[in-house]
């Protein structure tokens, strides 16, 4: 049995790279742009959903970070014994937030790139049909 590479989640960047290779190879092999566009738009919708979920998680992480900052501030002022622990917790959340921002940035840029791919496929279809937009 083949080893699954997505046991712990899908590598979204690899997923996107595979889709872009699929589109490029399909165009080279003469696959109808209509079929490629239909499939690409389905995957684009999946990617947009993924991006939305990560936006929500990123915003919730930001809210948690602000809440933890308030708790750390309160702890430093009133309960110095737990200030180090709270500071460590805040550092962990800041690091998590940084990784989420990086991942969201990559997803956002990839979606924008996929819009260009869809536009290219639309233009190919229009040229094939003799339409000029």
Image (cartoon, grey):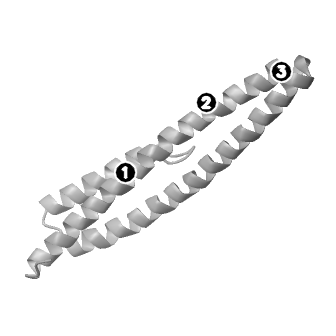
What is the x, y in percent for residue 110?
A: 37, 51
What is the x, y in percent for residue 20?
A: 28, 53
Task: Rate crowding at label 2 as few (under 14), some (14 to 19) or many (20 or more) other CA atoms within 10 Å.
Answer: few
Q: Choose the circle earlier in sequence order: 2 or 1.
A: 2
Q: What element carries label 2?
A: helix
Q: Quadrant of residue 130?
A: bottom left
What is the x, y in percent for residue 40?
A: 33, 65
Q: Tell me which residue sits at (10%, 75%) in the image.
A: 127
Residue 42 seen in the figure: yes
Instruction: Tell me whether circle 2 and circle 1 mark residues in contact (CB < 8 Å).
Output: no
What is the x, y in percent for residue 24?
A: 20, 56
Q: Is mark 3 on a helix, strand or loop?
A: helix
Q: Choose the circle earlier in sequence order: 1 or 3.
A: 3
Which residue extends farthest left? 130
Instruction: Tell me whether circle 3 and circle 2 mark residues in contact (CB < 8 Å).
Output: no
**Residue that carries the numbered disc 3 in the rendered image:** 83
Look at discs 1 and 3 and give the one toward the viewer: 3
Q: Choose the circle earlier in sequence order: 3 or 2.
A: 3
In the image, is 109 to the left or to the right of 73? left
Q: Which mark is residue 123?
A: none
Distance from Cα at disc 1 to Cα at disc 3: 40 Å
Q: Quadrant of residue 126?
A: bottom left
Distance from Cα at disc 3 to Cα at disc 2: 18 Å
**Residue that carries the numbered disc 1 in the rendered image:** 110
Decide: is 33 above or below 103: below
Q: Tell me which residue sits at (26%, 52%) in the image.
A: 21
Task: Rate crowding at label 1 as few (under 14), some (14 to 19) or many (20 or more) other CA atoms within 10 Å.
Answer: many
Q: Tell me which residue sits at (55%, 41%) in the image.
A: 100
Q: In which quarter of the image is residue 23?
A: bottom left
Task: Rate crowding at label 3 as few (under 14), some (14 to 19) or many (20 or more) other CA atoms within 10 Å.
Answer: some
Q: What element carries label 1?
A: helix
Q: Residue 95 carries which label?
A: 2
């Amino acid at each position: 049995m083949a080893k699954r590479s997505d046991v712990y989640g899908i590598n979204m960047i690899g997923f996107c790279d595979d889709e872009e290779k699929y589109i490029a190879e399909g165009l080279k092999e003469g696959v109808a742009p209509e079929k490629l566009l239909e499939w690409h738009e389905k995957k684009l919708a999946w990617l947009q959903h993924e991006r939305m979920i990560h936006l929500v998680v990123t915003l919730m992480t930001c809210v948690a970070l602000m809440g933890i900052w308030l708790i750390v501030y309160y702890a430093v002022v009133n309960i110095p014994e737990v200030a180090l622990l709270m500071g460590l917790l805040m550092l962990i959340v800041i690091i998590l937030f940084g990784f989420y921002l990086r991942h969201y940035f990559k997803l956002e840029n990839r979606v924008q790139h996929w819009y260009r791919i869809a536009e290219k496929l639309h233009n190919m279809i229009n040229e094939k049909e003799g339409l000029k937009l």
